[in-house]
Image (cartoon, rainbow, N blue to C red):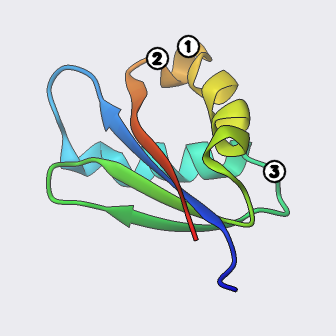
Amino acid sequence: MRPMKSKLTIRRAGIVSFGSAPTDAIRIIAALPAEWHTELDIIDSGEIVLTIRGVTAEGALDKVGPVLTHPAYSHLSVVACETQR
């Protein structure tokens, strides 16, 4: 059986700036639980895609959602979240 993982796509509101996506992504990852194995991909549109192993989409949203409510991240929102096996 393949291990479970969740995939979250996070988008910047308003004007999309690819240049700020790496900084935003690193700040989000730093705020997540240290034991999570997180892979990062930034696609051409500037969207941040986080793949987190061993966590369901619901579990990931439970942690990422509150992070994005912080004023420093108010320009970001989760636009897709799915559990993959």
Task: Kindly indicate the quadrant of the structure image that contains residue 78.
Answer: top left
| Residue on which disc 3 sits | 33
What amino acid does circle 2 point to? Answer: Ser
User: Residue 15, located in which quarter of the rendered image?
Assistant: top left
Q: Tell which of 61 and 15 is nearer to you.
A: 61
Task: Identify the residue at horizontal 62%, vertical 65% (top origin).
Answer: 5
Of callouts 3 and 1, which one flags the residue occurring earlier in the amino acid sequence? 3
Quarter residue 65 falls in: top right
Secondary structure at badge 2 equals loop
Is 55 displayed left or right of 15 in the figure?
Answer: right
Q: Assign the N terminus to one quadrant of the image.
A: bottom right
Residues tagged 3 and 2 counted as in contact (Cβ below 8 A): no
Residue ranking furthest to the bottom = 1
**How many other residues sit within 10 Å of disc 3, few (<14), some (14-19) or many (≥20)?**
few
Quick one: 50 or 6, which is closer to the camera?
6
The CA distance from mark 2 to mark 1 is 5 Å
Tag on residue 18? none
Crowding at dot 2, Cα within 10 Å, few <14 / some 14-19 / many 20+, comes out as few
Q: Residue sitting at 54 percent across and 22 percent down? A: 72
Q: Which mark is residue 71?
A: 1
The crowd level at tag 1 (other Cα within 10 Å; few <14, some 14-19, many 20+) is few
67 sits to left or right of 16: right
- Per the image, the residue denoted by label 2 is 74
Place of residue 13 in the rendered image (x, y in percent of width and height, measured from the top left): 27, 22
CA separation in Å, label 3 and label 2: 20 Å
Where the C terminus falls, by quadrant? bottom right
Per the image, label 1 sits on a secondary structure element best described as helix
Dot 2 and dot 1 residues touching (CB under 8 Å): yes
Say which residue appears at 63% left-offset and 35% top-offset. Answer: 61
